[in-house]
Image: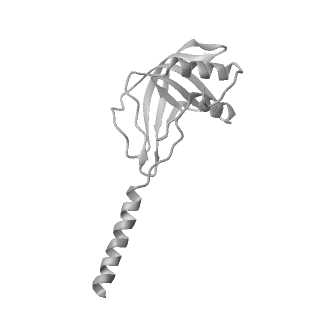
Amino acid sequence: MPALRALGTGLALMASLSAGTAQALSCLQPNPARSYAQAAASDEAYLVVTGELTHDAGSGTTREATQVPARITGHFLKGSGFSEPMDIPVTLALSCVSVWCSSAPENGAQVLAFLKETPTGYVLDLPPCGGWMFQDPRDDQIAAVTICHTGGSCEAGQ
């Protein structure tokens, strides 16, 4: 019987270890219209921008939360479109949820981003599930955000 007890303990240990590796982070697919609605409903102020994001973070996923200095050059949303030029410093806030961590976008990437205004400057939150930055935004994504901003329908399906 001791052999069976040891075998049972070993199998239980293997089952618990394999159960941990089978877990996955479940995320809603990021959507610019949903992000706009969340930013508009937030108590925090956001600046919505399109442009080139530059930084020296390198590539790859982080293993811990970190902040990276960056810069966005492009246009911010005002009135009926992305018409106001801007060139501003921004902090990339990469974060983790358990073992899942975010990564910095490619240096020089074209982005649609929702920058949180803070007392120390603008912050681009980059959680593992995304949602505040869209790399290589499509025309329909930019149009959906513009429609939201001008009082049109702001549905996540756009």
Horizontal arrangement in the rendering, residue 98 relative to residue 17 (left or right): right
Does 5 sit above or below residue 61?
below
Horizontal arrangement in the rendering, residue 8 relative to residue 150 (left or right): left
**Where, quadrant-wise, is the C terminus in this rendering?**
top right
**Where, quadrant-wise, is the N terminus in this rendering?**
bottom left
Residue at image coords 38%, 42%:
62
Residue at image coords 44%, 44%:
65
Residue 44 in the image: state x and y as whole percent.
65, 34
Residue 143 in the image: state x and y as whole percent.
59, 18
Closer to us: 131 or 22: 22
Residue at image coords 40%, 33%:
104
Residue at image coords 55%, 31%:
31
> Colour scheme of this structure image?
one colour
| Picture quadrant where residue 33 is located | top right
Does 4 sit above or below residue 61?
below
Closer to us: 108 or 8: 8
View extreme (right): residue: 151
Closer to us: 16 or 133: 16
View extreme (bottom): residue: 1
Does 8 sit above or below residue 143?
below
